[in-house]
Image: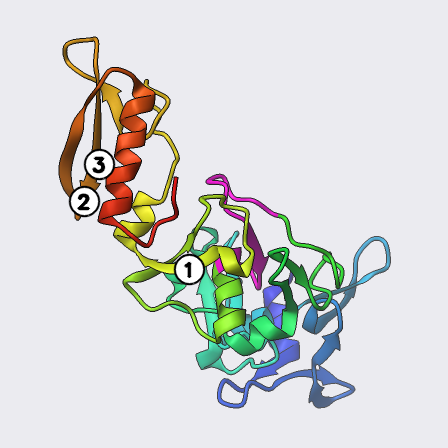
Amino acid sequence: MNLQAFLQNFRYDPVSGLIERLYGGAWVPAVRICKAKGPKVSLGIANSAGKKLAISALRAAWILHNKKLPEEGFYVYAKDWDSSNTKVDNLVYMQPTDRRSKSLGIEITYERAVEVFNYDEDTGKLSWKIRVGNSRAGSVISTKMSDGYLCVRLDGITYLQHRIIWLLMTGSFPEEPLVIDHKNRIKTDNRWNNLRLVTVSENTHNQVDLLSTNTSGFAGVKKYTDGKRWIAYMYQDNVYKRIGLFDSPEEASIARWKAKDAAYPCLVER
């Protein structure tokens, strides 16, 4: 992209967000709506295949306002999730490592979520209501993160599916210090009756993932120093609590879960 040519042939009003191009000696609106990819600004040139080149209206607004090209790997998004709102105070410039909503300090709105997602509370499946990028309307979203949770990518930002589902069902995200927990400890089971709000401490106690250093095969169970018995332990309110010594890791694990259920009654039975 030739920056100087772009700056000479396009202009931008940061207050109204209006982007215009010079055409036949007059300034005319430059933004065109593309159903699949949102508002675009045509560069007036074509590639080797004869296809006209265009950039997003948000990116064009940022370039015209800053009079420079975004750095490689940087993106421009709308703070209010309305890609047609190109006012300068609505532009968010971010790095690839900052694409999660928490790090941006912005969250998807309920209105935006209802616009693009469908949710089946009986199956827990989240699907696209409309076409977004290469994803067709009606297709189930099954992307999984490295930690096992289902996620979805929208407007360049990755969200946990169960958070989007909570937003759709309640109209808002959970307020700290509450988090969303899967009752049956299955990270991909996003049925509505399997989701609940708990504290961070309660959520931690409902997890069953084993550390790489675990040698017993059971969470909260390790070999005692005598090399024969097994010790069961847990953390309650960040305080180490020894539950007891047992002849087998299975017995130690059962005792640990009983202790956890007593300490945290909201957790499911093991």
Q: Which residues are magenta?
A: 143-162
Q: Which residue is mark 1?
A: 196
Foreground of the two, 115 or 94: 115
**C-alpha gap between disc 1 and disc 3:** 22 Å
Question: Label 2's element?
Answer: strand
Are discs 3 and 2 less than 8 Å apart at CB?
yes
Q: Mark 2 vs mark 1: which is more N-terminal? A: 1
Q: Residues within 10 Å of mark 2 (few under 14, many from 20)?
A: some
**C-alpha gap between disc 2 and disc 1:** 20 Å
Instruction: Name which quarter of the figure residue 213 lies in.
Output: top left
Name the amino acid, label 2: Gln
Q: Which residue is mark 2?
A: 236
Q: Is residue 51 above or below residue 38?
A: above
Q: Position of residue 12 (x, y in %)?
A: 56, 83
Residue at 75%, 64% (x, y): give it: 137
Please state if 228 lies on the left or on the right of 184 as rendered.
left
Foreground of the two, 88 or 165: 165
Please state if 63 lies on the left or on the right of 268 as rendered.
right
Residue at 57%, 74% (x, y): give it: 112
Q: Residues within 10 Å of mark 1 (few under 14, many from 20)?
A: some
Q: Is residue 194 above or below residue 137?
A: above
Is 37 magenta? The answer is no
